[in-house]
Amino acid sequence: MEIIIGWLYPKLMSTYGDRGNVITLQRRSQWRGYNVTVLPLDQNSTPQDIKSVDVIVGGGAQDRQQEIVMRDLQGAKAEAIKDKIEQGTPGVFTCGSPQLLGHYYEPALGKRIQGLGILDLVSVHPGETSKRCIGNLVIEVTASRLARELQAMTGIKPYLVGFENHGGRTKLGTVEPLGRVVYGLGNNGEDGTEGAFYQNAIATYSHGPLLPKNPFVADWLIVTALKLKYQQEFELSPLDDTLALQGRESMFNRLKLTSSLVINE
Amino acid sequence: MKKKSKFIPIINRIKLYLAVSIAKTITFLVRSLGFGAASVLPGAIARRIEPKLLQFLSQQVKKGVILIAGTNGKTTTALLLCTILENKGFKIAHNSTGANLENGLATALIENTNLMGYLNVDYAILEVDENIVPKVLQPLQPNLIICLNLFRDQLDRYGEVDTISKKWTRAISTLPRETVVIANADDPTLSYLGQQLHQRVLFFGLSEPENYLDSIPHAVDSIYCPRCGDPLDYQGVYLSHLGDFTCPSCGFNKSQPLLLSGEWSQILVGLYNKYNTLAAVTAAQELGIDEPTIKNSIDNFQAAFGRAEDLLVSGKKVRILLSKNPVGTNETIRVVTQSQDKTTLLVLNDRIPDGTDVSWIWDVDTEKLVERGGTLIVSGDRLYDMALRLRYSQSSLDSKIRLIVEEDLQQAIKIALENTPHHETLHILPTYSAMLEVRGILTGRKIL
């Protein structure tokens, strides 16, 4: 069995430890005996490279870097990413990359950056002097199919623990939110939504990175990728996630979220 | 160095007197009650009374105000330059506790005034947080500015490396022509900054290709040409994005360092301290200090607290290596892996001085620490984040390391010491606030 992890512009879009999502997917696959390839999808890649990947990871970027990415992600390459997501290739996109998958992003300074328009959302930075959204973030996954599948894997209602750190605010159109904010600000600090879920693409402001403390999401990405690639059911062997559970528990306690409510509901 | 006007209007003289005497009283009270070193509060209150305090105090400095800015190495560089100048008999004001925002600078200057607000020092050496550089240049009117490096640090507080360097360039440009700038030639952003200024700029950097890294580490910010935005060509990197580079598109080039790095020994351990040494030496030479004094100071240098500091704790050797951002931590890990010692304690906090966002640990190449085996102990506010980072550094489930996760820092230190054989050194890699806590526990003394 082989999994190819496509990593969007590692040198340009990995500002906030987003590499952690790649590492988590890579290790959890390796530990179970699957062969893993991490394939950078950047200026040197072809549309064919993009078509070959089984799961996609995208991180955040500084504004200048985001512009360089969008200049490169045009034509056949843009189409390839669009097709992948439409065909159900799973992915996790943090911070800058959901902005890029949306219609556009307006930075604090400079021109509007056009996105790929795959997700029906727009992101706007409200200006240099406005406060960044920074802090611990807990959300309940509400995207219905994802919530159902995660709950089937773990037996409990899925809550995600992360950290947000973003200047831009995102407003969703018709796309389903990933979840509702339990603690923190989420997409815009106003409507209580966080992230977006479309086909099998998870978009979120929750970095930290997302996957190490939410290992069941990593496993969902792996299993979804394998199912799609090999067209058969997969049961992943369990891994020891004690550290992640302790880390979650410790964060719930710190944020004074009744952990029984959050974990065993 | 040029002397500045010392004139202070009478009304400000009175306010300055009030500000300074109240600040000094607070310092006295805080210290005598054992609440800490009082390195911020006195300055904060004094600046409320006399908002132009920084200006009025710094203009009294006799020979020169020296600013040190950069992401990593400020404290060590400042301490070396201080040592060199003190060895020459000069009197120095220095914010030696690393309190590097405006109130910390004010406190350090107040320390050296008499009750009337008269400052009696030859030099002020001020470490300045990268974000407040533009704000303090006008009041402080520095004679010399050292720009050490610009790395990604504390993303929750600061914008982007690009933005910071642009702000620095703009702010330094408004200073008089006589200002001297010392910049890191190996850092493309700062090389470019130096090339744009109308002032006298001296560069420092390495010319030691034998110390190139095998590959560019992941935690790299600036691989794009600061002038045209195209990718830079690196002949080699020394650490992070510091190295020998050219831009194939626009011809932008590394500036020529003043000193040949190979001719100078360095303080402490690690290549990053070679940079700190070269920066201080370039500054000292510019201030007219003779070579024997400089070399002698380097050879007899003691570390600033928590920066490659060696302690002896109940018969065991302990080395504290401040590890507060990806680049710094990659380098402290390099120091650990180059030693024979196999016990390391990592302490990760997420308080304001550390930056509340700890995701940067995923940009650190902890794999290098884990590959060599040994005992790793983790503690701090975000110990599970660090523990997960180390767990995910292992390619196979048969662990080469023994990972001990201990919430109680005191207990973690105890376990770490017990696990360190007598002939080995325990390395401790803490973030900033964790470093203060660790030192507090190890030395029984608190620093605020």
Image (spheres, coloured by chain):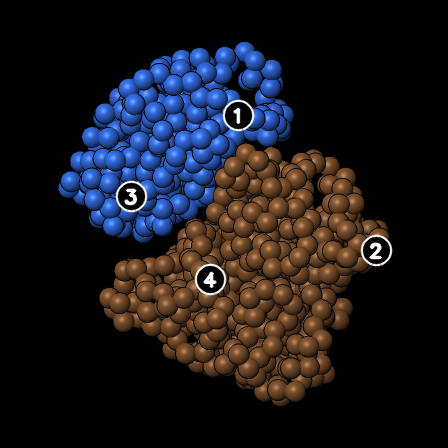
Chain colours: A blue, B brown
Kindly identify the amino acid type of the residue bearing the numbered disc 1: Leu
Q: Circle 4 sits in a helix, a strand or a loop, which is it?
A: loop
| Residue that badge 1 annotates | A239
**Which of the two discs, 4 and 3, sits closer to the camera?**
4
- Which is nearer the N-term, disc 4 or disc 2? 4
Q: Chain of mark 4?
A: B
| Residue that badge 3 annotates | A41
Q: Circle 2 sits in a helix, a strand or a loop, which is it?
A: loop
Number of labels in the image equals 4
Q: CA distance from mark 4 to mark 3?
A: 24 Å
Q: CA distance from mark 1 to mark 2?
A: 41 Å
Q: Chain of mark 3?
A: A
| Residue that badge 2 annotates | B315
Residue B413 in view in this figure? no
Kindly identify the amino acid type of the residue bearing the numbered disc 2: Gly
Q: CA distance from mark 4 to mark 1?
A: 35 Å
Q: CA distance from mark 3 to mark 1?
A: 29 Å
Please tell me how crowded label 4 is: few (under 14), some (14-19), or many (20+) other residues with Cα within 10 Å: some
Residue occupying image coordinates x 42% and y 58%? B215
| Residue that badge 4 annotates | B213
Which quadrant: the N terminus of chain A? top left
Residue B63 x, y percent position in the rendering: 61, 81
Kindly identify the amino acid type of the residue bearing the numbered disc 4: Leu
Residue nearest the viewer, comparing B326 with B419: B419
- CB atoms at circles 3 and 1 under 8 Å apart? no
> Left or right: where does residue B118 sit relative to residue B189?
right
Residue B3 vertical position relative to residue B204 in the rendered view, above or below: below
Please tell me how crowded label 3 is: few (under 14), some (14-19), or many (20+) other residues with Cα within 10 Å: many
